[in-house]
C-alpha cells in the first residue's frame, strides 16, 4: 500500500482541482459542510440539482460509473481524491447519494437496456432524484421480513403496505421498492424489486421530525398503488438478490465516506474558543484528547485505503467497510460531544445566534445517532465482523426454512 498519489493520481487530482477552482468557491472556515439529507428546502434542492448538472455536463458526475453509462470509469482511489478535492469547496448538500451510490448501480446490474436508457441519464444529470423504500416498521435489520405486498393485476402490480425512514421521499421522482409477492415460500424467496414513481396515486408521504427538528426522512404509505410490470427489476421472486446489490453498494458508499474532515474542524474550533483565558488548543488535556481522536481517525483512513487497494487490484471488498462505519460513527459522535463540552454552557444550546460555532457541533451530534443506525446498526456490523472476520458461529435464525406466512409474529390471537 502506498500513501502517496501515483503520477496518474496526481494528474487526476490536478485536473479535478483546476475544474473545481474554475466552477466553485473555496470553502471558508465558517462555511459548514452541508449535512446530507437534512437541508431540503426548495432552494437547496434546486442548488444541488444545478451543481449536479454542471458536473454532468463537464464529465465530473458519477465518476466511478462506467463510461457507457455516462460516468468516467474512475477508480475507487480517484473517487476518494475527487471527494477530498470537492470537500474543499462550497457545494450544495448532497441529495443524490442514494440515487447515484445505490439505485443507479442496481439498475445497471439488473435493469433491461430500456430501463437503463429511461432512468440512468436523468439520474446522472440530477434532473430526477431517487429514494430507497426498503425499511418497514418491523423490517429494518431483518429486511427480508418485510410485509408490504404486491399482487399482479394484468400488466400492473397493486401495492399495499408501509415503508419507513425513507430519506428524501418528499423530493423524489423515483424510488426503489422491495415488496412481498409470494408469502408461501421462505422469506428471502418471496420478494420482488420494483422502481416506483413517487407521484403515483395512492402514495402518501408523511415527514418524521428528527431530534434536531430536521425533516430528512418519512413514513411512506401505499394504498392500491399501481406499478406497471415493466418497472420490475429482474424476475418475480428474485428481489432479494437485487436488494443485495443495492445493500453492497450502500455499505461501500457509507463505509468509504468516513473521513477526518470533522477533526480538522475540531482543531479549528479549539483554536478559536477560550479555556481559562487562553485558546483551548493550548490546554494539554484538550490537545491529548484531539490527538487521540486523530490517531484513531488515521487508523481508520488506513484501513479504508486497504479496501481501496484491494478494489483497485480487482479483489472483492472485505469487511473493512463495516469496521469503518462502526468505529468512525462512534468516533465522530465522541468528537462532536467533546466540542460541545469545550463550548461550555452554550454547548447545550441549539441556537445558531448564541452558540460560538453557529450550533454546528450540536447539529452534528444530534444527527450522529442516525448514522449509527442507517445502513446497518452497530450490533449488525458487530455480527458481520464476528462472523466474517473472527469466524464465530453465525446468528441464530429461528425462521430458517419456514414459509413466510408461517413465521410466528407474536402470541396467538
Ligand atoms: C438517518 C437514517 C436514514 C435512513 N434512510 C433510509 C432510507 O432512505 N431508506 C430505507 O429503506 N431505510 C432507511 N433507514 C432505515 C435503516 O436502514 C434502519 O433503521 C436500519 O436498518 C435498522 O432497522 P430498524 O430501525 O428496523 O431496527 P431493528 O432492526 O428493529 O433493530 C432494533 C435494535 O435491535 C438490534 N438488532 C436487530 N437485529 C439484531 C441481531 N440479529 N443481533 C443483534 N442486535 C440486533 C439493532 O441493532 C437495533 O439496536 C434510515 C435510517 C436512519 C437512521
Image (spheres, rainbow, N blue to C red):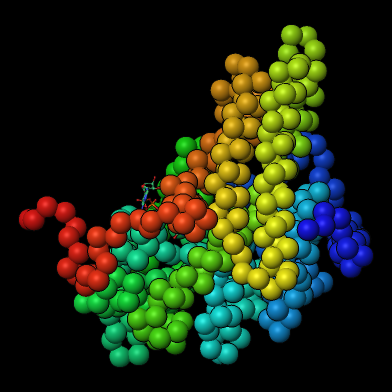
Residue 310 makes an appearance in the image = yes
Return the residue nearer the eye: 354 or 12. 12
- The residue under the point 72% across, 24% down is 288
Q: Percent from the top left, x then y, of residue 181?
A: 30, 78
Q: Percent from the top left, x then y, of residue 115?
A: 54, 85
- The residue under the point 46% across, 42% down is 210
Residue 8 picture quarter: bottom right
Note whether 62 is above or below 93 in the view shown.
Answer: below
**The N terminus lies in which quarter of the figure?**
bottom right
Return the residue nearer the eye: 272 or 38. 272
**The C terminus lies in which quarter of the figure?**
bottom left
Q: Percent from the top left, x then y, of residue 365?
A: 57, 35
Note whether 165 is above or below 99 in the view shown.
Answer: above
Return the residue nearer the eye: 120 or 368. 368
- The residue under the point 25% across, 71% down is 401
- The residue under the point 75% across, 59% down is 80
Residue 162 picture quarter: bottom left
User: Left or right: 263 with respect to 97?
Assistant: right
Residue 204 makes an appearance in the image = no
Note whether 109 is above or below 387 in the view shown.
Answer: below
Q: Residue furthest left?
A: 413
Q: Percent from the top left, x then y, of residue 130?
A: 54, 67
Amino acid at each position: 500500500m502506498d500513501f502517496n498519489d501515483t503520477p496518474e493520481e496526481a494528474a487526476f487530482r490536478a485536473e479535478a482541482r483546476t475544474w473545481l477552482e474554475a466552477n466553485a468557491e473555496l470553502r471558508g472556515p465558517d462555511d459548514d459542510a452541508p449535512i446530507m439529507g437534512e437541508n431540503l428546502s426548495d432552494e437547496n434542492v434546486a442548488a444541488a440539482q444545478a451543481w449536479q448538472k454542471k458536473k454532468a455536463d463537464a464529465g465530473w458526475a458519477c465518476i466511478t460509473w462506467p463510461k457507457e453509462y455516462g460516468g468516467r470509469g474512475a477508480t475507487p482511489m480517484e473517487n476518494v481524491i475527487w471527494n477530498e478535492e470537492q470537500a474543499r469547496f462550497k457545494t450544495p448538500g448532497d441529495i443524490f447519494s442514494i440515487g447515484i451510490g445505490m439505485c443507479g448501480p442496481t439498475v445497471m446490474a439488473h435493469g433491461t437496456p430500456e430501463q437503463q436508457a429511461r432512468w440512468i441519464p436523468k439520474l446522472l444529470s440530477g434532473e430526477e432524484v431517487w429514494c430507497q423504500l426498503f425499511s418497514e416498521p418491523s423490517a429494518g435489520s431483518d429486511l427480508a421480513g418485510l410485509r408490504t405486498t404486491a399482487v399482479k393485476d394484468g400488466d400492473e402490480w397493486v401495492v399495499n403496505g408501509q415503508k419507513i425512514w425513507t430519506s428524501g421521499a418528499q423530493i423524489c421522482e423515483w424510488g426503489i421498492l422491495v415488496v412481498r409477492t409470494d408469502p408461501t415460500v421462505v422469506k428471502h424467496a418471496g420478494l420482488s424489486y420494483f422502481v416506483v414513481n413517487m407521484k403515483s396515486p395512492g402514495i402518501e408521504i408523511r415527514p418524521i421530525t428528527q431530534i434536531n427538528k430536521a425533516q430528512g426522512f418519512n413514513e411512506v404509505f401505499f394504498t392500491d398503488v399501481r406499478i406497471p410490470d415493466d418497472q420490475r427489476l429482474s424476475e418475480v421472486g428474485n428481489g432479494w438478490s437485487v436488494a443485495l446489490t443495492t445493500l453492497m453498494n450502500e455499505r461501500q458508499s457509507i463505509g468509504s465516506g468516513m473521513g477526518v474532515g470533522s477533526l480538522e474542524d475540531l482543531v479549528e474550533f479549539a483554536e478559536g474558543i477560550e479555556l481559562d483565558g487562553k485558546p483551548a488548543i493550548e490546554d494539554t488535556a484538550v490537545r491529548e484528547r484531539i490527538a487521540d481522536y486523530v490517531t484513531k481517525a488515521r487508523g481508520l483512513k488506513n484501513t479504508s485505503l486497504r479496501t481501496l487497494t484491494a478494489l483497485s487490484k480487482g479483489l472483492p471488498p472485505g469487511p473493512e467497510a463495516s469496521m469503518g462505519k462502526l468505529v468512525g460513527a462512534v468516533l465522530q459522535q465522541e468528537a462532536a460531544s467533546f466540542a460541545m463540552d469545550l463550548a461550555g454552557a452554550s454547548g447545550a444550546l441549539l441556537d445558531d445566534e448564541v452558540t460560538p460555532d453557529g450550533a454546528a457541533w450540536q447539529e452534528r451530534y444530534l444527527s450522529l445517532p442516525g448514522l449509527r443506525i442507517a445502513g446497518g446498526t452497530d450490533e449488525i456490523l458487530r455480527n458481520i465482523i464476528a462472523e466474517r472476520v473472527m469466524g464465530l458461529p453465525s446468528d441464530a435464525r429461528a425462521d430458517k426454512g419456514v414459509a413466510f406466512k408461517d413465521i410466528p409474529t407474536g402470541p396467538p390471537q
